[in-house]
Each structure stands twice: as structure tokens, then as C-alpha cells.
Amino acid sequence: MQRSRLGLLALLAVLLVVPLALDRYLLSVMILILYFAFVGQAWNVMMGFAGQLSLGHALYVGLGAYTSAALFQHFGVNPWLGMVAAVAICVAMASVIGWLAFRFGIGGTYFALLTIAFAEFTRIGFDHFGWVGASGGFFLKVVQQDRVDLLHLRGHPLMFYYLALALAVLGFLASAWLLRGRLGFYFRAIRDNEEAARAAGVDVFRYKIYAVQISAGMTALAGVFFAFYYNNLFPEQIFHISRSIEIILAPIIGGVGTLFGPILGAAVLTTLSEGINALLTMSGYEIPGAKQIFYGVALGLAIMFMPNGIWPAIANRLGFRRQDGDDDDDG
Amino acid sequence: MPLDAIANIVLSGLLTGLIYGLMALGLSVIYGVVRIVNFAHGELMAVAMYATVFAFAFTGIDPLWMLLPMALAFFGIGYLLQRGIVNPFIDRPEHSQFILLLAVALVLVNLLLVAFGPDARSVQVDYALDSYEIGPLLVDKVRVICAAIALVACALLFAIFRYTSFGKAIRACADNLLGAQVVGLNVRHLYALTFGLGTACVGIAGTLLSMLVDVTPGLGPAYTLLAFVIVIIGGLGSMVGALAGGVLIGVSESVAGLLITPSAKSMLSFALLILVLAFRPQGLFKGK
């Protein structure tokens, strides 16, 4: 068995056992890490694999969350069914955005701005959308937490931990499968040289749309998780551009386009930012904005000095290169 | 709704739009020459607004007297920003540049938040409530003065680009980088000067706008997005487009505030952006 695979299985085993020994706070931190690992993986499909920069991924988290939560609260629709609806809506939205943009070959900065525009437009729209509480927020009924009800996604944080873990594993497997398959090769061909890919016969328009759809569908799952884990949704928070930025931090710092980068990035960033929070709380200075300054500095340093992220460097050191089923040049 | 009320709203939106135009012009100039999208544009603007608010609070000097020092200071900030941080990224992929400036923006806006808190602050000059009456129209004195200054600043910038040898050199860099290097232009220096000019626009626009709106750190990201909306609607890199786009957005914001609700006004701007990107990505005021 390959070393990288053994390493992953060992990591998974640890992640399966470790929450049993954690207190509530550490458990919530672990859930956060897994959550950011998963949305990072979802974003990575679009940017890391296919080279399309989205700065509006909060749109899909928000739409997914609101769709499943509203169906559950208003019509009593089971969250697992709501999840299907959430994915469908996000994929449809992604198709519209992708179609509008790629039809005229809008890429790079313009495309990133288009994604921001859609996210902001939707945020302000939900601020005035009375059916889901508008700017006052939308709340799910919280029931007693000791009974685990997987069918309705109600229960103890431990259940959410395993759900988040399942999402992260799913994200990893989906990414690995994508990279190895035909789709992954098309994506990377488009990322590396769109004209050359087109000349080689890749239907660029279609595969870019696929990348956006897959990424949006995955992010929708994260949104459903978010809704049922936190039980309250505010447009100002969930759709905000700072959320979109939070989503892209982990994969950028971990390593854009790599399989393990988003996971590593999420672990490093969340641990650091929670550490800073804890330090600030202990010292008695709870300063709003301090965490974001840290994010900004981390992002700036990462892009200046490690434009490929942390993971490629580490993977190289450990001799994992070429074994991840990944590209030669991006670990 | 009475007609003169609408006319008043449109006029006030038009005047504010001229200041927006100056802000967007800064972004457009930087993009047009340096080919870098300054994602920290609005955050720099927020810094200028806070500087004005505090200078006014401590000295009581009319912000209009601060315009020149602010423009110079922000010219310096822009020059250093380009030389120190942005320049190594000139040849990097677009998304790297984007993320670098995003990081600068994130740090700037949150430094403001940490330093001054989330509360709104404002500048109240003693003629803040004066207004001019032109027939049925009633316009704020401050707004008229600010718009006039913004227009003058834009005209100055046009003149610099059009008639000075420095402007000619910058245009040469924008037109043909290799050619500019061949004839011995110091491209790095010119890029930094251009970045400085673009940032000076923000210094002036920020000083002016702080007299018209309440200042909060949250304005930073909001103005960055607004500046983007304006330059894309006008045509990225087009100077006239930026000004015209600013006026268009200024008017559409105030009309949306009147007809829908004030909190939904930027929704219309984003809708306009989506429409322009979808159907005329080169912008409304720019030929193909």
C-alpha cells in the first residue's frame, strides 16, 4: 500500500476516535476545521482544478442553507430531501452565472467580480425577503440536544462532528476522483492554457460550466450543514463577501489545486485563529477585527512567499509527490 | 410623487456621482496603466475619510483646506504601495495580484475597526445645512462644492495625462510596454507614479465624501465594490467611462433609494453590473 494512502487512513482513524476525548469547545473547533476543509475543497474544484476564480462562494453556502432551512421550517421537509433541493438550486444558479460569463469568454478578474456581484445582489435581496425573516434572521427550532436524530439532523454536536467529517472525506474522495478522471484532465488543461485546450478539442465552455456546477453543488451541502448546525441564518453574515474570502483562505494557504492543501490550510488557519481568539479572551481584550487582521496578514504572507501553499512544500519533503494521483507540478 | 422632488433627488445623485466618478477614475487609471486591479481601493478611501474626520475633530479646519495635503499624502501612500508590495507581483497571475490586494484591504479595514470601532463618525462644517435654491430645485451647498471640486480634480487628471510629458510617458507604458522600455522609460517608477495618482484621487474623493456621509469602517469594502461596479459599467481603463459610470451609479442609487428602499440601493447597482457584464462586458462607454 502506498505511503500517502496509509497516512490518510491513519489520519482518518485518528479523526474518528479523537472527538470522544474532546470537550465541547475543542469539538466545535474540530467541526470548524472540517467545515472549512470541505468548502475549501469545493472552491478548489473551480479555482484549483479549472482555474476559475470565484470570490462569491458564500452565495452557494447561503442559498443552500436558506433553501433547506426554509423547506424544513415552513413545510416540514426532511433535511435530507431539502439537501437535494439545495444542491439543485445552487447548481442552477451556478449554471446561470457560468453561462452568462463563459458565453463571452469572461474570465479572470471580470469573472471574479461577476461572482461577487451575484453574491452581494443575493445578500441584499435576502435582507428584504420577509418569508425567511429578512435582515432579522431566520431561526430553526432547537430541540433538546442529547437525543440524536440523524433523520432530521437534530442532536448532539458529536453527530455534527461526524457529519462534518463525512463531508470532508466525501470532498476529498470526490476531488481525488475528479483529478484522476477525464474531467480532471480537461479542467487542468483549461486552467493551464485555455486556448491550447480549445485547440486540442476540449469543449472549454462546457467543462468550465461543469466545474462551476460541481463546485456549487458541493458548497450547497456545506450550506445545509451550516443551517442545521448553527440553527440561525442572517443574510448579513452568511452571504457577506468576508465569508467568501474566509472560504478561499484555507485552500490558498494550504495549496491551490492540491488534494490535501485545503484540509491542511483549514487546520492551520482555524487553529491559529482560535488560538489568537483564546489569547485575546484571556488577556481581557476582545477586539473585533483582530482576527481579520490576522487573516489579512496570513493571506498576504502566503501569497508573497508561498504562492503554491504549504502542502506542496511538505509533500515534497515527505516524498509524497507523484503518489497522490496528482499532477507532477502541483503535488 | 411630485416632479420637483424627483428632480431634486436626481440632481443630488448626480452630484454625489461626480465624487464616485473621481474615486472610480483612480481605479481605472491604475488598471489602465499598471494592469493591476486595486482591490484595496475603497479601503484606502475609508482611510482618507477617517483621516479627514479626525483632522477636523482635532483642529476644526475646514476639510476643503485639507484636500491638497491629503492628495499629496495619498499620492505618497500609493507610490510606496506600488513600489513596496505590488511591484513584485506585476508578472504574477491575475488571481495572485487580486489576492495580494485583498489581503491589504483586509488589513486596512480591520485596522480602522480596531482603532476607531464600528460607530459612525461625521464631519459637520458650519455651512453643512446651507442650500442653494435654483427655481424649484433645492441643493445642498456642501454637495455642490464637493462635486465641483471632484470635477476639477478629474479635469486636472485628464490634463496631466494629455498635456504633460509625464502623462505621455505613462500612456506610452500603457500602449506598448516593451516599446516604452526600449526608449528608456523607467517603467517601475512610472507605474508607481500612476498608482500614486490613482490613490491621490481616492484621497481627494474620500475627503470630499466624508463631508456628505457618515464614516464607518464598513464603507471600505462597500466602496471597493462600488468603484468596481462603476469602472466596469463605464469600461475598465476608460477615463471618461469612469466619470460617466460614476454619475450613472450616483443617480441610480438615489432613485432606487427613493423608489424602493434606501437599503436596497446598491442592489440596483449590482443588477446593473450583472447586466453590463452579461451583455456588454467592455462597458457602456467604451468602443470594442
Image (tube, rainbow, N blue to C red):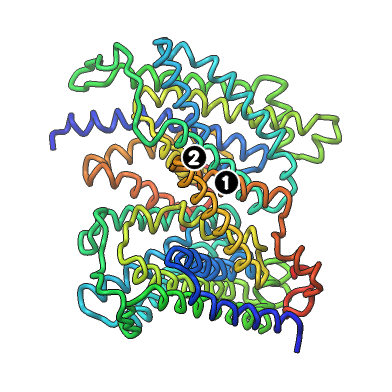
Residue A26, image x, y percentages: 48, 65
Label tally: 2
- Identified at 64% across, 43% down, the residue is B36
Residue lying at the far left in this picture: please name it: B2
Q: Which residue is mark 1?
A: A296
Quadrant of the rendered structure where residue A249 is?
bottom right
Residue B24, image x, y percentages: 50, 35
Depth check: A26 or B204 in front? Answer: A26
Depth check: A314 or A237 in front? Answer: A314
- Identified at 60% across, 56% down, the residue is A108
Left or right placement of residue A43 versus residue B127 in this view: right
Q: Which residue is mark 2?
A: B110
Q: Are marks 2 and 1 in contact (CB under 8 Å)?
A: yes
Residue A64, image x, y percentages: 38, 70
| Chain containing mark 1 | A
Residue lying at the far bottom in this picture: please name it: A1
Give the number of the disc on residue A28: none
